[in-house]
């Protein structure tokens, strides 16, 4: 299915379908800036003789006054990490190009922050200096100002008291909060997350989802776009303004989802949410069967 269009599927209940449709209509009424946040133009990626991404095209608009989260779902091996790494500038496309705010991506840049499942922070720096270091060395701020900004993000990411600790002394959830603080403090307009909560247990995962909802939807400090790759369907639906399903390197489905109105743990046990999860689950199961068959 092409991006932004809706498809009537017999297995969707009329309520769920109407909701997709309403959200899609609301999106059309939003005011967008001239240059999109991110664009893929005819991107192809081959590894040796295998084509991982045959022809990728998308536009992520820059919506005035709004941060947005795009979550990316799909069976293992469908090309999610390849797409994210190309946007990060860590992997060049074989042909075609990505653009951020109208400029071609030619490598990593301060406009894009990347958060991996593990090891996103400097092991030899304290929590405070992990946040301050890129502000000094990349954004050329004086140390004093950088540490003030860092302290603000330490508090905002619920890391108060851990300023002088090293990453190895932190729990998995705290390490990811530190990685997020580092990226957001540098005010990157694009944040790329590859299975950021994949190593965390369910309870900590819910807490991280609540935190992302807080910083993106309820108390944003600047506008940004998050692209988040996840295997976890409830996580994708809870956090995603827009959910992409990828199959064999193509975006085969785009749906718009409701923003959260309650914490992850409660929201994800509601019947209408479970119905959405089972709808997406069925879609992805079909793709896995198609991929294996
Ligand atoms: P996903 O993140 O959805 O699991 P990937 O982007 O990692 O998928 O991989 C997409 C396809 O490209 C897979 O078939 C994978 O085997 C292949 N691939 C990924 N990285 C490499 C690489 N460095 N060399 C060769 N093939 C690769």
Image (cartoon, rainbow, N blue to C red):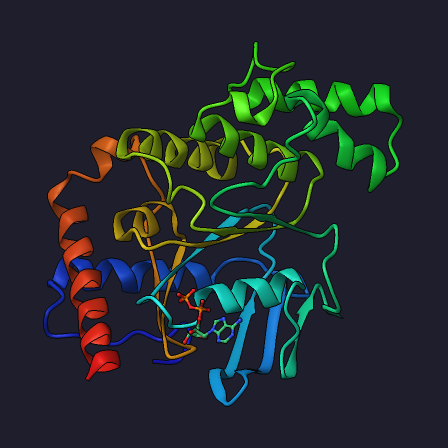
At a point 29% along the width and 65% down the height, the residue shown is 21
At a point 37% along the width and 45% down the height, the residue shown is 198
Residue 103 location in percent, x, y? 76, 68
Residue lying at the far bottom of the rendered structure = 49
Most foreground residue, 222 or 236: 236
Q: Which corner quadrant holds the N terminus?
A: bottom left
Q: Quadrant of residue 229?
A: bottom left
Label tally: 0
Residue 144 location in percent, x, y? 85, 18
Residue 97 location in percent, x, y? 66, 78
Quick check: 279 left or right of 224? left
Query: On screen, 141 above or below 183?
Result: above
Q: Quadrant of residue 121?
A: top right
Q: Which corner quadrant holds the C terminus?
A: bottom left
Quick check: 35 left or right of 242? right
Query: On screen, 81 above or below 123?
Result: below
Q: Is residue 50 visible?
A: yes
Quick check: 73 left or right of 32? left
Query: On screen, 171 above or below 80?
Result: above
At a point 30% along the width and 60% down the height, the residue shown is 22
Give the quadrant of ligand 1. bottom left
Q: Is residue 8 visible?
A: no
At a point 32% along the width and 33% down the height, the residue shown is 206
Most foreground residue, 8 or 105: 105
Residue 98 location in percent, x, y? 65, 72
């Amino acid at each position: 299915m092409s991006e932004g269009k809706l498809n009537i599927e017999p297995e969707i209940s009329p309520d769920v379908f109407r909701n997709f449709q309403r959200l899609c209509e609301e999106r059309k009424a939003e005011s967008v800036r001239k240059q999109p946040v991110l664009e893929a133009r005819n991107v192809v990626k081959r590894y040796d003789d295998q084509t991982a991404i045959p022809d990728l095209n998308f536009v992520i608009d820059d919506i005035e006054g709004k941060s947005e989260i795009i979550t990316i779902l799909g069976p293992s091996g469908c090309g999610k990490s390849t797409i994210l790494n190309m946007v990060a500038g860590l992997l060049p496309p074989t042909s075609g190009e990505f653009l951020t705010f109208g400029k071609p991506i030619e490598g990593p840049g301060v406009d894009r922050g990347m958060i991996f499942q593990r090891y996103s922070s400097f092991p030899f720096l304290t929590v405070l200096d992990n946040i301050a270091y890129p502000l000094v060395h990349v954004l050329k701020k004086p140390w004093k100002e950088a540490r003030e900004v860092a302290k603000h993000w330490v508090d905002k990411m619920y890391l108060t008291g851990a300023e002088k600790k090293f990453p190895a002394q932190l729990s998995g959830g705290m390490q990811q909060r530190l990685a997020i603080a580092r990226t957001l403090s540098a005010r990157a307009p694009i944040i790329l997350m590859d299975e950021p909560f994949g190593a965390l247990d369910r309870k900590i995962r819910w807490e991280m989802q609540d935190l992302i909802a807080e910083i993106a939807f309820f108390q944003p400090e600047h506008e940004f776009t998050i692209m988040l790759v996840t295997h976890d369907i409830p996580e994708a639906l809870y956090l995603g303004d827009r959910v992409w399903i990828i199959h064999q390197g193509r975006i085969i489905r785009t749906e718009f989802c409701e923003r959260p109105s309650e914490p992850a743990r409660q929201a994800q046990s509601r019947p209408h949410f479970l119905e959405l999860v089972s709808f997406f689950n069925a879609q992805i199961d079909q793709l896995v069967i198609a991929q294996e068959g």
